[in-house]
Amino acid sequence: MSDKNDEAARQKAAEGQQASIPMAPQDRRRAFLVLTIGLMCTGFSQSVVYAILPPIARDLGLSEMQVGSIFVLSSLFWVLTTPWWGRRSDKLGRKLSVLIGLFGFSLSMLLFTLTLQAAQAKWLTIGAAFPILILTRSLYGLIVSAANPSAQAYVADRTTRDERTRAVATIGAAYGLGATIGPGLSASLVILGILVPFYFCVLLGLLSAALIWRYLPEKERPLPAHAKVKLRLFDRRIVLNLVNGGLMSSAQAIMIQTVAFYMMDRLSLPLDHAAQYAGIGLMAASMAALFGQLVIVHRFRMSAPVLERSGLLIAAGAFLAMAFADQIGPLVFALTMIGLGQGMARPGNVAVASLIVRRHEQGAIAGLNNATNAFGFLIMPFIAMPAYKLDPSLPYLIGAGLLFVAMVISVADPNARMAASKAGEHYEPDDMDDPARPL
């Protein structure tokens, strides 16, 4: 009986451990903007790496499967450590956890780039460089995974339920903002050297960390060490939502990991043009995702489940169009619609999960949500790349199928309906759902 009482006390501490200093809504919006700008380096680096690495890899003699495998161990570590970082941010504080992730980002990108440069200069054989590339990219999965769940939890801590979908979309725009700028800027920086955009990513990570450290307020006390928050992976409230997150991630991984190869082969591009054309396509997708996150979500104010299903339908149709496109115009248009669909579906999916758990579980659910982001990148190299070898269109047909399945799950999930019906309700007595939540 005493164990039950102790556990109840720990849970109450987890729910109620908050600061007492209120903050005006305009100050909170400013803090979210700082967080969004500070985190854009993650989206920037992803679009740059996936646009530029395939041509470099082919020049070094790496196969498509080897390129995909570089990211497999990183994705595995991301899946395993992101939930831990989400819970850990309750103890360390959201701001410190974000800073750890950003410094880890800069370190991993620097080591990865130095390895590529050594291989290009023949200081390392490709046989020696390949495992080092895997290890340095794995550092990304181990440490950078601290940033996103902590940022998501920071936002969830400071929003009411009816604000949650728009707030999550805004913080998700950090990735979209970086991914939009990335391909265009990297295409310009490639003129100075094909690895220059990677070094720019390192600098951007350090500048982002400085911005967060200087301007992101956090006066809220972290939870005491004994206050444990557990959220099981197979909790019936969230399991279908997490499955959908994994399906979206898998479709996104298919597109990102194959698009540069797809354009090279469908358009018969030389290697020196491949990075620029892939960059154009990824930039279009990123701009559309940003439009979905910052315009459609805020302007139309759809419920989280409706937003998720609409985005899934758009993205699934665009994957089908991608499979049959063989000219630059249709290819870029299909990528644009994939980006728009993902920019709507992902915030909807994340907001559904945040709405159906309690306030003290926000760090834990943010960690699990972000783990699903890497799930597709963990398994898709073993599915998409062999499928690509059989037929370059096949991975995109697989992506369309995955998204249609996700849409069916979203419609059938009773917890998604609950999130829609209770989005504006304050049904937790200790929730502290105040628009002027303290920072």
Image (cartoon, helix red, strand yellow):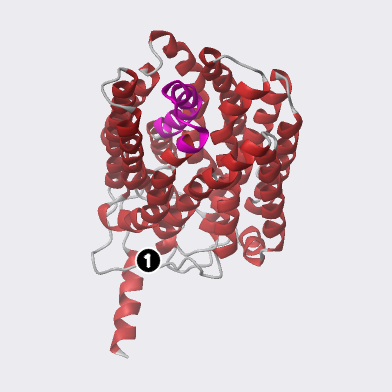
Q: Quadrant of residue 132?
A: top left
Q: Position of residue 375 (x, y in %)?
A: 50, 50
When asked about the image quadrant of residue 330, the answer is top right
Q: Residue at position x 30%, y 20% from top?
A: 122
Indicate whether residue 53 is drawn in magenta: yes
Quadrant location of the N terminus in the rendered image: bottom left
Relative to the observer, which residue lies in front, 75 or 341?
A: 75
Q: Could you say where residue 342 lies in the image, as x and y percent from the top left? A: 61, 40
Residue at the image point whose x is 29% and y is 68% from the top: 227
Q: Position of residue 195 (x, y in %)?
A: 37, 19
State the residue position of label 1. 15
Identify the residue shown where x is 34% and y is 43%. Answer: 138
Boundaries of the magenta span: 40-66
> Can residue 212 be seen in this snapshot?
no
Q: Amino acid at mark 1?
A: Glu
Left or right, residue 273 beside residue 393? left
> Horizontal placement of 308 versus 271: left or right?
right
Q: Most prominent secondary structure in the magenta stretch?
A: helix
The structure residue drawn at horizontal position 68% and vertical position 45%, both measured from the top left corner, is 398
Count residues near mark 1 (Cα–Cα under 10 Å), then give few for <14, some for 14-19, many for 20+. Answer: some
- Queried whether the magenta region covers residue 144, the answer comes back as no
Does residue 316 sit above or below 355 in this rendering? above
Extreme top residue here?
A: 191
Q: Decide which of 85, 263 is in the foreground and name it.
A: 263
In the image, residue 209 above or below residue 90: above
Element at badge 1?
helix
Q: Nearer the viewer, residue 79 or 70?
A: 70
109 shown above or below 72: above
Residue 68 point in image, percent of width and height: 48, 38
